[in-house]
């Protein structure tokens, strides 16, 4: 009975080897000059810098997903995707093609970044000193509407219409050159970290609810008249702890040295074992770093 069991196990092992070998010999492409098998493709790809980079990212994603996957929701990825589509409009698909990416690849890339962001956040000690320092430049998310025109004379026309009692939304729909005109000039909420003209942000944050800029703000885009729709109370740094932590995390994501330390720590704790001897040193730059 034991002998039969050994023979059976041996046969199963042989079948597995044959199966794996067959998979390796499957064609990725065929030409009149011959076949390109998965094995030959893999052996060539792993020698390239791009191939190694892809494997590094795949390994990192696996470890990050195990540690922080529960903290990254599909809704977060969808929100960023929708924001990008709104920002680029009809050019979105063209930009994807230019980058050589599919929608699925972009979605995976965004998820990878969110996972890494969680790793940075979990490995940061948010001290009161750090939070207070960030709070000095902090502004909570505000909602404004704007009217963008390209000349001073157009700005004067807008001002006269507003002074005569026309609603901001009505004037925006008629005169604004910005796509937001269809929403009465209303923009997505933003805080002090938004990638907007500093002049625009400074003018906006000085407004109270219902107020609009009496003097058009001159920026690289033209002349902008801004109205404050909703401005929450700034509160204390303790009231805004979560927002401040997020802002600090985003800032640290731009610190190459810190990012290297975080990735190194994640990989060293990830029980990574490279099976292919020719790729044993693929993570050497991270695995040799001190914890």
Image (cartoon, rainbow, N blue to C red):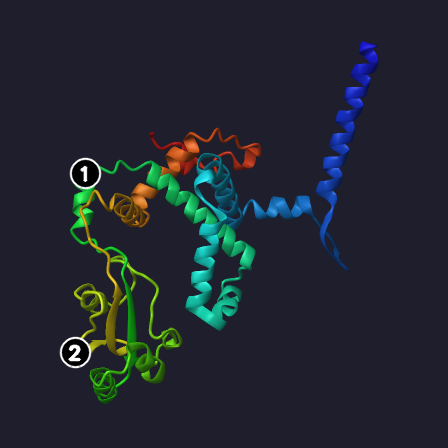
Binning the other alpha carbons within 10 Å of mark 2 as few (below 14), some (14 to 19) or many (20 upward) gives some
Label 1: which residue? Answer: 128
Residue at 62% x, 45% y is 42
Residue 186 place in picture, x, y as percent: 33, 70
Q: Is residue 192 above or below residue 117?
A: below
Residue at 35% x, 84% y is 174
Q: Is residue 217 above or below residue 109?
A: below
Quadrant housing the N terminus: top right
Q: Give the mark count.
A: 2
The mark lying in front, picked from 2 and 1, is: 2
Q: Nearer the viewer, residue 179 or 227?
A: 227
Residue at 43% x, 35% y is 284
Label 2: which residue? Answer: 215
Q: Secondary structure at mark 2?
A: loop
| Res 233 visible | yes
Residue 77 place in picture, x, y as percent: 47, 52
Residue 151 place in picture, x, y as percent: 25, 86
Quadrant housing the C terminus: top left
Residue 142 place in picture, x, y as percent: 27, 61
Which residue is outermost to the front? 165
Residue 21 is drawn in which quadrant?
top right
**Distance of label 2 from label 1 (alpha carbons):** 39 Å
Q: Secondary structure at mark 1?
A: helix
């Amino acid at each position: 009975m034991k002998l039969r069991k050994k023979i059976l196990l041996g046969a199963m092992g042989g079948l597995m080897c044959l199966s794996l070998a067959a998979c390796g010999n499957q064609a990725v492409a065929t030409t009149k000059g011959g076949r390109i098998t998965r094995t030959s493709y893999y052996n060539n790809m792993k020698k390239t810098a791009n191939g190694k980079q892809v494997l590094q990212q795949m390994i990192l994603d696996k470890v990050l997903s195990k540690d922080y996957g529960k903290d990254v929701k599909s809704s977060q990825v969808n929100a960023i995707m929708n924001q990008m589509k709104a920002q680029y409009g009809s050019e979105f698909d063209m930009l994807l093609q230019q980058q050589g990416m599919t929608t699925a690849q972009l979605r995976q890339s965004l998820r990878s970044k969110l996972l890494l962001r969680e790793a940075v956040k979990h490995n940061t000690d948010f001290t009161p000193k750090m939070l207070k320092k960030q709070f000095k430049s902090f502004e909570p998310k505000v909602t404004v509407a704007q009217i963008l025109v390209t000349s001073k004379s157009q700005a004067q026309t807008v001002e006269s219409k507003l002074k005569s009692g026309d609603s901001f939304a009505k004037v925006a729909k008629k005169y604004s050159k910005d796509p937001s005109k269809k929403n009465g000039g209303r923009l997505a909420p933003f805080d002090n970290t938004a990638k907007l003209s500093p002049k625009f942000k400074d003018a906006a944050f000085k407004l109270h609810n219902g107020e609009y800029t009496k003097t058009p703000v001159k920026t690289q885009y033209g002349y902008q008249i801004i109205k404050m729709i909703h401005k929450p109370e700034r509160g204390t740094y303790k009231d805004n702890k979560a927002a401040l932590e997020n802002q600090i995390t985003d800032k640290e994501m731009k610190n190459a040295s810190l990012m290297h330390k975080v990735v190194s720590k994640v990989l060293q704790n990830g029980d990574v074992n490279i099976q292919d001897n020719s790729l044993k040193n693929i993570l050497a730059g991270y695995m040799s770093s001190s914890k």
